[in-house]
Amino acid sequence: MRKSWDLQTDVLVVGYGLAGGVAASIARDGGAEALILEKNEYPGGVSIFAGGAIRCIEDLEEGLQYLTAISGGRMEPDMIRTFAEGLAGNEAFVRKLAEVDGAEVKKMNARSGVYPYPGQGTIYSVRVAKIPDFNGFPWMNCYLNPAGVNMIKLIMDNVESRGIEAMFSTPVRRLETDESGAVIGAIAEKDGREIAVHARKAVILATGGFEQNDWLKKQFLQGMPFHSMAPLSHTGDGILMAQKVGAALWHMWHLHGSYGFKTPDSPIAYRHPFPGPRNPNRKMTWIVVDKQGSRYMNEYPPAPQDTGHRAMEIFDPDLPGYPRIPSLVIFDEEGRKRGPIAKPLGFPGYEYEWSDDNSVEIEKGWILKANSIGELAVAIKERFPENEARMDAERLEATVAEWNGIVKTGKDRFNRPAGTMMPLINPPFYAAEVWPIITNTQGGPVHNARQQVVDPFGQPIPRLYAVGELGSFFGHLYELAGNLGECFTSGRIAGANAAAEERLA
């Protein structure tokens, strides 16, 4: 057991995203000193790039029904009830936080969960519409919606108002335990040297997911490769540290993701520009085909930025290989002119603005152009070696012809809504590679209803908590805006329980 420490606090929060900021604030409200250590130069995690909708529920019993259904039998009833109770309290909690800086909190107009299960209608969201005298961060240029940035600013203002210190560019490398196995601190790195931080009450892990850890992705995700739009620093550090002290893992296969674009000049993947719940009357300009030119998925699922990757992950042992990784989006001239096919969410240093008519990306060679579908198939074989020359011109022509017939009838075997369909009839025609991409992973250390990290036998690891997407509630279907809602619920549960721990000498 370590005898000396460089820094001491009551509650050490590892990670300064949304969940970490909430947890630190609530721990401080509970009478505990709190310290945040953040790996990156700036706060925010992936939450700062989100749309900013914070999930809530109005009726607890209906919310229980809905959350039970989307959990698919993977979560225990006490966990579901605790999460439902947390979501039911989210709006009041966010409005209380807003008293610090005068933030304007608004209910969003849409009232519905994503999936058609009982209780769907009790789901709603709030967002931080604006904050007086705040117009964004100078280091943030590309994001999904100002509400996501406003939300993080609200949490930062609450952290600062409580006098909580946050140390940036200070990655935590490992946890420290005593002879009983209780977590009593951590070893971090600052300015090239190790520092030991004593946590007299508890450590709360708020480090996010493993979106940029290639080894973990290869071990836990079925398809390969997955690309991610998360910060490069999201390498699963909290997962590995928790494992080291005995944590069990769950939901490691499950992620919030879809299909999108990976360009050669950026390590960050780009999503397609259809966020939020599905609009059954918004036109989507493309279809998705596999390496041979066959369509195989609903390109426009209920949550367009979620579950779209699942159909891509199939492995064919007769090839052998992944016949759908990468796939291709196919669209025509009318589709090209309707708007950009990608929506980059560039992190500092990796910002990119996709051209409104896709012309710049055609010039770059990211999008192929041909006068006919047959010529497009030839161009695909020549340009994209990942397709291993499997693209079949006759099959692609048949696929497009079949699609145009589907548009006329409005009946699709993959259940794409008729109102989203567009024919592919106006040359020239276009193709671009798409890959399974990750917005954020959901897996990590198992926690109980108190947000305590537990071992493989279900026993809490003393004085260790996990919040946010680090071992998220979501292990079957992801509810849009649910991770932001969970950051608030898990942060306040862990913060309160950590503050209530007996203080070590």
Image (tube, helix red, strand yellow):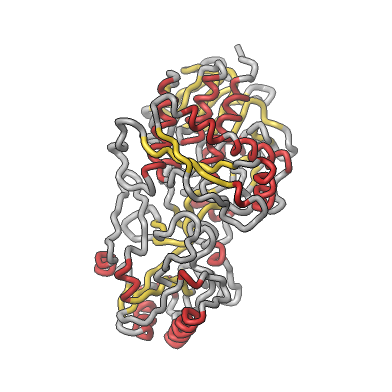
480 vs 501, nearest the viewer: 480
Q: What's the residue at 47%, 45% (across, down)?
A: 108
18 vs 1, nearest the viewer: 18
Q: Position of residue 3 (x, y in %)?
A: 56, 15
260 vs 143, nearest the viewer: 143
Considering every residue shown, the one lying at the far front of the view is 109
Q: Position of residue 294 (x, y in %)?
A: 50, 78
Above or below for 487 versus 179: below
Q: How many marks?
A: 0
Q: Quadrant of the C terminus?
A: top right
Q: What's the residue at 56%, 41% (across, down)?
A: 56
Q: Is residue 111 visible?
A: yes
Give the image quarter of residue 473. Answer: top right
Q: Quadrant of the N terminus?
A: top right
380 vs 285, nearest the viewer: 285
Q: What's the residue at 58%, 76% (across, down)?
A: 413
Q: Position of residue 463 (x, y in %)?
A: 63, 25
Left or right, residue 340 beside residue 20: left
